[in-house]
Amino acid sequence: MIPTELASKARKYVDSGAFFTELAELVRYPTVSDHPFGHVAINEYLYEVLAPALTALGCSVAMHPNPNPAGGPFLIGTRIESPELPTLLCYGHADVVDGHEGRWSEGRDPWTLTADGDRWYGRGSADSKGQHLINFTALRLLLAETGSLGFNLKFLFETGEEIGSPGLDEFVATHRKTLSADVLIASDGPRLDAATPTLSLGARGSIRISLDVNLRPDAHHSGNWGGVLRNPATTLAGAIACLVDGHGRIQVPDLLPPPLSGSVRETLAEFEVGSNPGDPSLDEGWGDAGLTAAERLYGWNTLEVLSIGAADINRPVNAIPGRARATLQLRYAEGTDIDGVPRAIARHLAAHGFSMVDVTAEEGFRPSRTLVDDPWVGWAKGVLAEVAGRRVAVLPSFGGGLPNHVFTNVLGISTLWLPHSYPGCLQHAPDEHLLKPIAREGIVLAAALFHSLGRHGREAS
């Protein structure tokens, strides 16, 4: 159990306003990884914020270039207390998505942290500067309370998670010895809901699929040529419908994962999705009818249309367009033959008369997860449930994407994700925010995990 004094200090750090002030300093750096101005801010953030924070934890700090020119640098912090102690690896990403300036409510500036009740608005407040600041704070408080961590600490920061973590796989493989550890504890993504402490054990993968129906360079009058010229927009709509029907059900068997295991279904049976204030209402009849909402969200594959267009939807003219395009996204669980996805889609479309649709795919994160019955999972769930005093949700996979496979598949370690946000945080959109109660409890939960790991390490030594 976490010492009462340590838990009290964790809560006071938030209640006093000190955490808000520190987070405001982090948010003011516009570390947008897909914009040129963001590269300067990212370097400043690494040198002026993260490196000093790691040094304050007694870490030696090293900056590393990215082997992939599309990505930014990496930062590693290392604190070795004893070779006999367990080693914890933490992870975070310094980059954020576009700020969407001018689109925030109440005229808010995305790079200025502003409070409205328990909501703290700012780009990166939830994804994920606020999350790694919570873990930094918990580690600082533990070190001040006990004088040592009781375990070895390694921290890896990347700067391109929001653009797919280019170079991360290669970098981690090259620095496997430097980053070797017994377990990963990191924070990203949302809890099951705002009120439920959550452990996520991995993530689904993602792949973007572009469909392009480029039939002719010009548009032609719909009265003069309608009925004799193939309409690319109509063709595209038909092609999409034979991949995923109008009720969200995937129509291509090769895009589906293996059946859910009994242990995953048993774990997910505990959870209800979309039952909290502020959640969108779930749509009846959407998605695979043989699965629960939790199973569809955390354990199954979904094919979503992200964008679709032909001509100018705001100023239509009486002409058959020459080209239509759409971008789809497959979120997929482990066991899906992702290497065969583009071929499977092209083959399926051709079989349904849509061979004129050009298919390309761009892979994002790969799926991976730690097993539900892994000993580290049981340990963490027990610690969190004891300190929280209520149920802890254990999700086999986070619904979105994270580079979890780098840790499970490349480093070969168990992964525990302790999210400090919630599904309604509006990450990646205007009005992104962190909830004060989650930050307050999050520091206590993280400190409890670190304290328990340290106590085990000290006892083992």
Image: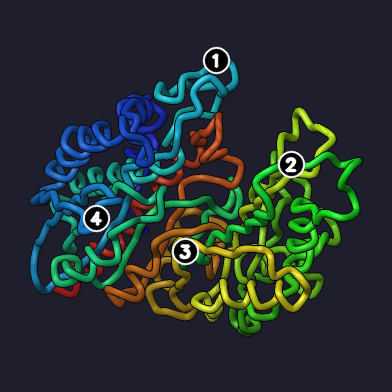
Residue type, mark 1 in image: Gly
**Disc 3 versus disc 1: distance between alpha carbons?**
36 Å
Residue type, mark 4 in image: Leu
Task: Give the SS element for disc 1.
Answer: helix
Q: Residue at x 16, y 37 (%)?
A: 47
Residue under circle 2?
Answer: 219
Dots 2, 1 in contact, CB < 8 A: no
Residue 332, x across and y down, in percent: 57, 69
441 vs 104, left or right, is left
Residue 44, x across and y down, in percent: 20, 32
**Disc 4 versus disc 3: distance between alpha carbons?**
23 Å
Residue type, mark 2 in image: Ala
Dots 4, 3 in contact, CB < 8 A: no
Q: Mark 4 or 3 closer to N-term?
A: 4
Q: Nearer the viewer, residue 415 or 255?
A: 255
Residue under circle 1?
Answer: 107
**Disc 4 versus disc 1: distance between alpha carbons?**
35 Å
**Disc 2 versus disc 1: distance between alpha carbons?**
41 Å
